[in-house]
Image (cartoon, helix red, strand yellow):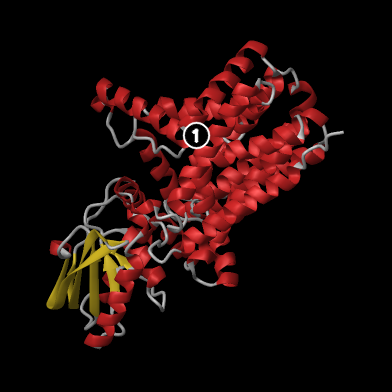
Amino acid sequence: MRKSPNYTLYFWLVSIGLVIAKILFTLRPEIDLFTEEAQYWLWSQNMAWHYYSKPPLIAVLNYLSTAILGNTELGVRFNAFALGLGMSWVTFRFASHLYSKRVGFWSAMILCSMPMWWQGSTFHVTDTSLSFCWILAIYLAYLGVSEGKTTWWIWAGVATAFGLMAKVVMVLIFPFLLIYLIYTHNWKAQNKNYFLFLAISLIGFLPALIWNWQNNFDTFRHLAALGTGGEKSGDFNVGKAFARFLGYLGGQLAMVSVFLLPLFIGAFREVVNSKDKVKIYLILPAFMSWAGFALLTFFAEIEVNWPEFSYSSLSIVMAAWVCEQNLMWRKVRNWAIGLSIGLPLLLFLPDFTFLKSIPPVKKVEKSLFRRLSGYQALADRLVSLRDSLGIEDAFVFSETYHMASELSFYLPDHPQTYMLNMGSRKNQFDLWPGLEQFVGKDKIGIFVSWNFNSPGEFADFQELLYEEELPVTFQGEPLRIAKIQVWRKLEEFNPYQPDSY
């Protein structure tokens, strides 16, 4: 008798192997924090109920992980590794509950094939915790719907509350569950549980409400600006709107992996034809999210990652469908998963095979990791300058929050850095004490920028003490050139006053 495969063991072997690969990637000396990761780390050094553009969960997680592992790249990315593993495990459990451990294993593997999973499980961004909370809440809510137990609805509410503290778009779970309950004629039996779930979930809004009440409702203004793209009613352009929509479609294919497209088409057709309620439950949240943001593309620029948090349940639909198909389709699945996981591993891992010496591969890697390189080298140079010029108490500033956050992380004493607004929209740095505190004081300021040669008219200093251009490389190849200027005594401070959110 043939022994049944141990799919749980297979799941853990693959998942732990992928975590190890991400740790090796993080330890590569030429790879720094992603600029958004650095920003969220800096938030954790300035704890608050909420932040200008996002809720507080990411800052809380960074605060806890770096308290244990230190202010290191691993200290920050531990959250991504753990939550990415959690996403895979919940997907495995969910699919195993619905179908079998075989389907559970392949669901997790398909999920791990999606670029959206690689992004959120490698770099600690807000979509990381949002995506984990989403699939967990969807799983728990399904148990509540199918078993009718209030306990599951309560736990789904807790997961949703944490999701709302990760990113406000978690609210999409409310209309999804409402529509599904009505569609399946469960509303009458489950409406009390739904309202209990809603009440518990909304606790996750409290930090945002408290902070926004104290800060002119800046977050809501920011979200409204994102939803309109800053366009006025008479600015609508059909051509641009359609181009944004097409770009959005292409971006979603990239986030889910073009190699998985045949599986998705087959699974989607099966759902449409069968109208299976379980599979509708799995595909409806992704469709609602996709459609909602697709509609927004006609009015504003939509970031490609915005709807990706809701796509994890698609992996279960695809796995359930392909596990029922013939050998040819299972080969398609294996090749799709192999390519979708193998290509990121080729780029992420150190060059064990020397394949990265091939010019096209080297060029792709340099392009992909452009925003993850050069900041440690910049910080090292600033340390050297502070020593040689005798300016240990100098403050550091840049025209972008990206540079300011990275330098705060990589400078050895992790100082509070500053942003000089030279034309960007409002951000968290505009709410913190800025360069105005140094006006008229005999203090040294160090300006660092990829884009500008000086602070210009926005900050007038008494004297320029030193300047240089620092070339930054990636694996020996030229990457970018940073301008570094050392100024004495800020006399006038005239930052750009953003009128957009």
Query: Does residue 414 appear to the left or right of 20 in the view shown?
Result: left
Q: Is residue 125 above or below residue 193?
A: below
- The residue located at (38%, 70%) in the rendering is 408
- The residue located at (67%, 14%) in the rendering is 275
Q: Is residue 25 above or below residue 254?
A: below
- The residue located at (30%, 85%) in the rendering is 392
In the rendered image, is residue 66 in sight?
yes
In x, y percent, where is residue 12? 69, 49
Disc 1 residue crowd, few under 14, some 14–19, many 20+, Cα 10 Å: many
Nearest to the observer: residue 473 or residue 128 = 473
In x, y percent, where is residue 456? 13, 63
Secondary structure type for disc 1: helix
Identify the residue under disc 1.
256
Query: Does residue 347 appear to the left or right of 121 in the view shown?
Result: left
- The residue located at (51%, 48%) in the rendering is 120
Query: Does residue 495 appear to the left or right of 261 in the view shown?
Result: left
Q: Which of the image's four quarters has the N terminus?
A: top right
In x, y percent, where is residue 270? 62, 16
